[in-house]
Amino acid sequence: MDETAPGGVYLCQVNENLSCGACCGLYNIPDLSREKLSRMLSERTEAFVKVPREIDAILEFGNNLLSAENKKRPFPEFYHCPYIGLIGKGRTRPGCLLHPESDGNNGVDYRGLGYYGSMTCNIYFCHSHTELSENYKRIIRGSSRDWYSYGLIITETALINAFLSETENRIQRKTDEKDIYRNPGFTCAVREFINLKLTWPFRPSSVTPANYFFKDKLYERKTVDYAGINSESVSLRHDAIFREFGSCFKSDEEVRKAGMIIELLWEKLQKGADNYEYC
Ligand code: SF4
Ligand code: SF4
């Protein structure tokens, strides 16, 4: 149990390859492909190495980046901080370039120069810390393979809760972190679920896979429009998941296919949870 994080599980910096920067606006950029985002962070980090640690130089760096980068953000009223870069020994995960422990800062906290100010950046914890149960947080953390997909899913509390609570209905017990350590089949199925966030075939290309998770309701997910769809094809169990994936369906057949994708995952999780032959 991590006493420093609300809810007992720290979600922001997990290990050398896993971290999230969603509240810094990491995903609030027009082209959210893994390649584009990785390249952007890498180039930004390289450039910041050469910036003298002086107030004017740091501010100029941030301002230049913001004016050079495409401002057509999916959530125009949300920020994208120019100081989110790559951190760690091999620069393998996103993190704050102004943090006192980041390269070149010699223990000085420069976060006060960012848009939110040092205090906010230091104490903010998103609602995933408190709205996801400890076991769900551990399951998502433990199953995630890379920062890119982890950061896209970890703020999706409604989606994770809908998916894992129905998983528990199917296996007729609480899920447990041990499910992912004991059984690769279970882990793979959770990973497939995590990856659906990006690959979900029923989200129109105009809808970003990024999540605006603040509570001001500025960019709430729309309810799924089932007009023209036979109500028998719609299952309430699936509806919350469809909505959180940003789905838009053109036919009964598409709704059925979407339901089958989710059902198949639940079957895999059930088999994985019941089958410890991999132990
Ligand atoms: S969005 Fe949540 S998990 Fe991600 S860095 Fe911010 S506080 Fe941490
Ligand atoms: S200054 Fe604050 S918002 Fe910007 S990257 Fe650092 S922690 Fe995130």
Image (tube, helix red, strand yellow):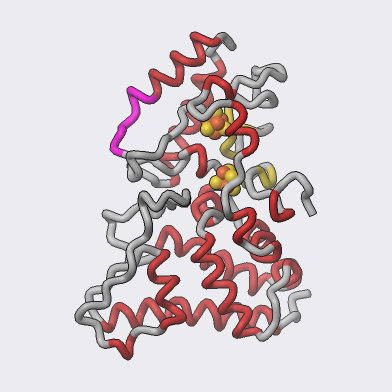
- Ligand 1 appears in which quadrant? top right
**Quarter that holds the N terminus:** bottom right
Measured along the vertical axis of the image, is residue 36 above or below residue 243? above
Give the quarter of the image for residue 32. top left
> At 63% from the left edge and 45% from the top edge, which residue is drawn?
12
Q: Is residue 140 left or right of residue 83?
A: right
How far from the left and from the top, in percent, is residue 97?
58, 26
Q: Is residue 150 left or right of residue 228?
A: right
Measured along the vertical axis of the image, is residue 167 above or below residue 120? below
How far from the left and from the top, in percent, is residue 271?
63, 83
Measured along the vertical axis of the image, is residue 121 above or below residue 212? above
Verify whether residue 71 appears in magenta. Answer: yes
Residue that protrudes farthest toward the front in the picture: 216
How far from the left and from the top, in percent, is residue 4?
75, 44
Q: Is residue 72 left or right of residue 19?
A: left
Give the quarter of the image for residue 134. bottom right
Measured along the vertical axis of the image, is residue 28 above or below residue 231? above
Residue that protrudes farthest toward the left in the picture: 228
> At 32% from the left edge and 70% from the top edge, which residue is drawn?
224
How far from the left and from the top, in percent, is residue 64?
38, 18
> Magenta stretch?
66-72
> At 60% from the left edge and 68% from the top edge, which residue is drawn?
188
